[in-house]
Amino acid sequence: MINVKVVVCLLLSLCAVAWSTPVVRPLPPTKPTSNDTAAISPFRNPVFDMKLTPEQMRSGVIDERYRWRNGFIVHPDRGFNQNEYSVINDALYELSQHLCIQVLMWPQDSNPTGDYVEIMRGGSGSGCWAWVGRLGGRQDLNLQFDGCIYKHIVQHECIHALGYYHEQSRPDRDDHVNILWNNVIPDTSHNFDKMDDTTTFGVPYDTRSIMHYDSYAFSSNGQPTILAKDGSTVGGNSITGNDIAKLQRMYNC
């Protein structure tokens, strides 16, 4: 005899699957993204860019527990307008071209489940920041509406969420740059801490990395906080070959 309760439960499950909102891949840009080079670095503000769990602060290592196993999944919140959403889409699309894991987006009007990054449209003064690596369930990434919604900044924060620290946090950074600690806002000095060498994946130090702060990042007095020893420009507004190499090695591409 057929169990009516079982049949009803199965039907409800099928309906839920049919009616659920699917995640989608970011689409190729339909027009060139606005000029990022015009943006002043938001990391000159006294707002943390990189957030770490207590365990990550103790160990300084991003291990495989923090990798995204079933694709890198994001949900831009409903506050972003069409132009802002396009910037996020274009940033993620470019990232997706260099990764061997899927990059997927929940539609803005959906209610995400599982592991995902909630990209929030933050108010003035809220900063640009992200948690590092996959934490499980919802984890937030903030884009201050008046200063953070640029392609390179979205990519910088998403690369944090993928599991990468800053380039200037590498153990070999003192061979390449000088940190002028007296010019750094004290409460933001952790952004310049050096981390364990397992995060370099054997890729050369890159002062032009999208993950490298510019010379005035988190300055307390308008003076430089980072200077390259060879006099080269520090910081970049686009993904470099070394950035790609590190991401691909992290995810075994």
Image: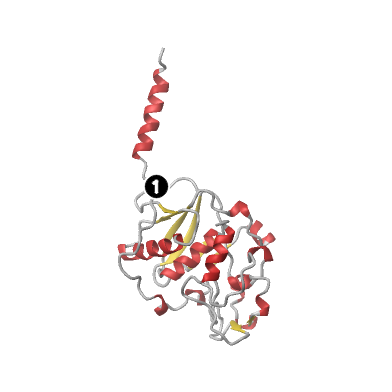
| Furthest-top residue in this view | 1
| Furthest-front residue in this view | 253
Q: Is residue 196 visible from the viewing direction of this image? A: no
Q: Quadrant of residue 146?
A: bottom left
Q: Is residue 4 visible from the viewing direction of this image? A: yes
Residue 208 lies, in percent from the top left, at 53, 77
Q: In which quarter of the image is residue 219?
A: bottom right
Q: Which residue is drawn at 59% across and 84% down?
A: 227
Q: How many labels does the image show?
A: 1
Residue 102 lies, in percent from the top left, at 46, 53
**Image quadrant where one finds the C terminus:** bottom right
**Image quadrant where one finds the N terminus:** top left
Amino acid under label 1?
A: Asn
110 lies above or below 211: above
Q: Name the residue under label 1.
A: 111
In the drawing, does residue 173 fall left or right of residue 241? right
Front residue of 119/92: it is 92
167 lies above or below 162: below
Q: Residue at x 56, y 81 (%)?
A: 220
Residue 58 lies, in percent from the top left, at 69, 60
Residue 60 lies, in percent from the top left, at 67, 62
Front residue of 67/109: it is 67
In the drawing, does residue 163 fall left or right of residue 239? right
In the structure shown, which secondary structural element does the residue marked by tag 1 occupy?
A: loop
Q: Residue at x 53, y 83 (%)?
A: 233
In this picture the colour scheme is secondary structure
Q: Which residue is drawn at 53% across and 59% down?
A: 162
